[in-house]
Image (cartoon, helix red, strand yellow):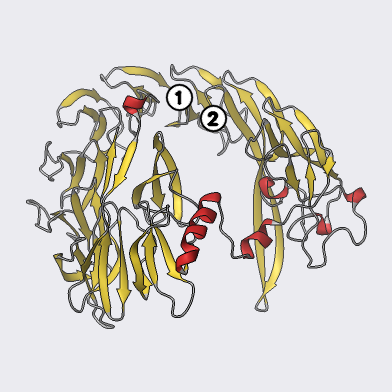
């Protein structure tokens, strides 16, 4: 990345404002820097919305079950629970009701556009201020992608641009709701009234049309299709021109991993019973045993793999099934076996060869990366041994931890014993080099870093050092990988607590400079989307830190 396009993120000071009297935090509004607040009553409790300056912008009149979210960081969406029919109301970020409505639904369509559903069930496209740009005539509107959106109406499909104008129309389409899909890689699927399926280009022309009972997008430019009479799981694959890559009914569970790599496999199930609270409970566990095809459908790896770990230093761990054997080892980037760690020919248990005790079937194991860890600095920790190598008294240490070993890139055993990860997790030690440095800087002041469990759902790279994290509740927030650690850097801050006396919390930056002195009895956790809350005594405070991104 050139210096002129380098990503630069800077943070402002931490702002702190008191909550209004009698108001308590009840969460954060996903998608924007607002707070959910409550009156704190035990019965008939009400909710409202507050900004980062402590101002109530939506009065505490909402039901405790009301769902409050934001649409593209411009609109506050409040959905009241049934039995209210018109349950969706929209507000701007100052809490002012937006004109129109109420609505049955309001959704984010992308491209700073909103989909509005009227009380009669019809949809329309609206702008960022919820002003309709089209007539309320559509049965379904798909998200904007590549500057176009697919909108379904009876007997026709419209291609819309962000202004709401109709770019093209295809008639004679199916009346089945949801027969079409959004654009991806320049194509969108849809169905005809006669039951055939097709792929639509952004200009309204049809790329191909096939006889199929199912046509849907798959990854990396492929389409998944099925014909009548083909059972579930035996779908075929088409390329972007509608040409058959893998015929339907020939392979099971096709999954494109790249433009030139397709995974296929069969689900293998294991059933067993257990007694819980005096009742017999049946359990089912399934695992995919898989192989690989190239981009033209030719087999390059047979269906033998039960699990494969991440590639590291040109090698990756694998568990593969060969006749009556389950083979554990490492392979190179070309899927060629490099060396074998263990071979198990037993249908029953392998005993203490595994980290957490017994394994009832050779195909149902822990994740391979926990049995055989990725290589680092030319060595890897292995927590499984060949059954014939197990010696009494050597299978575990005095504390009952499994006896692991180090192996080099040729599979040779190295001196020393690795420490089990479960044991490392029980120790009160920093989790990264950044954490150790921060702990050392804070120690002279009697402060220690506070750690939080990883509550994020996914992290996706946006540009350079900037990532976008998605939390389990759907909220999204940017982060810098150079500042973020597993211990909880958020918004360039780390929560710290006093190491002696009564525990109080504050915040410091990665350099150990305390920006908010430890004074709070309780906090709302790490900064998320630039804000959190804290409490001292009976007083609550809203804390925020603005962030500026350049480059």
Q: Nearer the viewer, residue 13 or 312?
A: 13
Give the total number of marks visible in the rendering: 2
Whether pointer 2 and pointer 1 mark residues with C-beta atoms closer than 8 Å, the reply is: yes
Q: Nearer the viewer, residue 504 or 153?
A: 504
Question: Which of the marked residues, 2 or 1, is nearer the chain's N terminus?
Answer: 1
Report the residue at 30% width, 44% height from top: 10
Q: Is residue 222 above or below residue 231?
A: above
Residue furthest to the front in view is 444
Q: Position of residue 405 (x, y in %)?
A: 80, 49
Residue 58 appears in the figure: yes
Q: Secondary structure at mark 1?
A: loop
Q: Is residue 137 above or below residue 224?
A: below
Q: CA distance from mark 2 to mark 1?
A: 9 Å
Q: Nearer the viewer, residue 309 or 302?
A: 309
The quadrant where residue 353 appears? bottom right
The quadrant where residue 67 appears? bottom left
Residue 324 appears in the figure: no
Q: Is residue 430 above or below residue 213?
A: below
Report the residue at 50% width, 64% height from top: 443
Q: Nearer the viewer, residue 271 or 430?
A: 430
Q: Position of residue 547 (x, y in %)?
A: 28, 47
Report the residue at 54% width, 30% height from top: 256
Report the residue at 25% width, 40% height from top: 109
* Res 256 label: 2
Quarter of the image where the N terminus is located? top left
What residue did someone put label 1 on?
221
Q: Position of residue 24 (x, y in %)?
A: 26, 74
Quarter of the image where the C terminus is located? top left
Q: Secondary structure at mark 2?
A: strand
Q: Residues within 10 Å of mark 2 (few under 14, many from 20)?
A: many
């Amino acid at each position: 990345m050139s210096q002129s396009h380098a990503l630069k993120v800077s943070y402002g000071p931490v702002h702190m404002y008191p909550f209004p009297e009698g108001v308590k935090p009840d969460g954060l509004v996903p998608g924007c820097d607002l707070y959910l607040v409550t009156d704190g009553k035990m019965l008939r409790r009400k909710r409202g919305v507050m900004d980062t300056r402590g101002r109530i912008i939506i009065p505490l009149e909402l039901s405790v079950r009301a769902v409050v979210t934001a649409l593209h960081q411009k609109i506050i969406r409040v959905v009241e629970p049934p039995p209210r029919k018109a349950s969706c109301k929209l507000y701007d970020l100052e809490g002012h009701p937006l004109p129109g409505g109420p609505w049955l639904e309001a959704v984010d369509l992308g491209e700073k556009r909103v989909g509005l559903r009227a009380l009669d069930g019809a949809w329309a496209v609206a702008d960022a201020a919820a002003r309709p740009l089209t007539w309320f005539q559509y049965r379904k509107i798909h998200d904007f992608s590549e500057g176009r959106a697919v909108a379904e109406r009876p007997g026709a499909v419209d291609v819309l641009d962000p202004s709401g104008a109709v770019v093209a129309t295809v008639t004679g389409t199916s009346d089945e709701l949801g027969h079409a899909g959004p654009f991806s890689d320049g194509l969108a699927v849809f169905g005809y009234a006669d039951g055939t399926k097709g792929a639509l280009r952004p200009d309204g022309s049809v790329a191909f049309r096939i006889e199929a009972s199912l046509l849907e997008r798959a990854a990396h430019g492929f389409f998944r299709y099925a014909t009548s009479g083909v059972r579930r799981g035996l779908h075929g694959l088409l390329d972007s021109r509608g040409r058959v890559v893998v015929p339907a009914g020939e392979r099971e569970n096709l999954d494109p991993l790249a433009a030139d790599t397709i995974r296929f496999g069969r689900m293998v199930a294991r059933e067993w019973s257990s007694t819980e609270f005096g009742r017999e409970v049946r359990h089912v566990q399934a695992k995919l045993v898989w192989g690989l095809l190239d981009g033209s459908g030719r087999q390059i790896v047979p269906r033998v793999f039960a699990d494969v770990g991440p590639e590291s230093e040109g090698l990756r761990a694998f568990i593969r099934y060969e006749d009556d054997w389950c083979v554990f080892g490492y392979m190179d980037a070309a899927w060629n076996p490099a060396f074998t760690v263990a071979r198990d020919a037993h249908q029953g248990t392998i005993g203490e060869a595994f980290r957490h005790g017994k394994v009832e079937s050779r195909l149902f194991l822990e994740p391979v990366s926990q049995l055989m860890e990725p290589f680092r600095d030319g060595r890897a920790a292995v927590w499984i041994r060949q059954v014939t190598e197990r010696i009494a008294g050597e299978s575990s240490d005095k504390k009952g931890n499994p006896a692991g070993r180090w192996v080099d890139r040729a599979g040779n055993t190295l001196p020393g014993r690795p420490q089990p990860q479960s044991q490392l997790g029980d120790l009160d030690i920093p989790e990264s080099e950044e954490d150790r440095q921060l702990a050392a800087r804070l120690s002279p002041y009697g402060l220690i870093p506070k750690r939080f469990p990883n509550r994020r759902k996914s992290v996706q790279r946006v540009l350079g050092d900037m990532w976008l994290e998605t939390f389990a509740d759907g909220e999204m927030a940017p982060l810098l990988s150079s500042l973020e650690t597993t211990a909880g850097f958020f918004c360039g801050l780390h929560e710290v607590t006093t190491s002696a006396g009564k525990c109080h919390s504050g915040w410091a930056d990665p350099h150990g400079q305390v920006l908010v002195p430890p004074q709070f009895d309780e906090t709302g956790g790490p900064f998320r989307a630039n804000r959190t809350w804290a409490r001292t005594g009976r007083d609550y405070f809203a804390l925020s830190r603005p962030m500026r991104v350049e480059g």
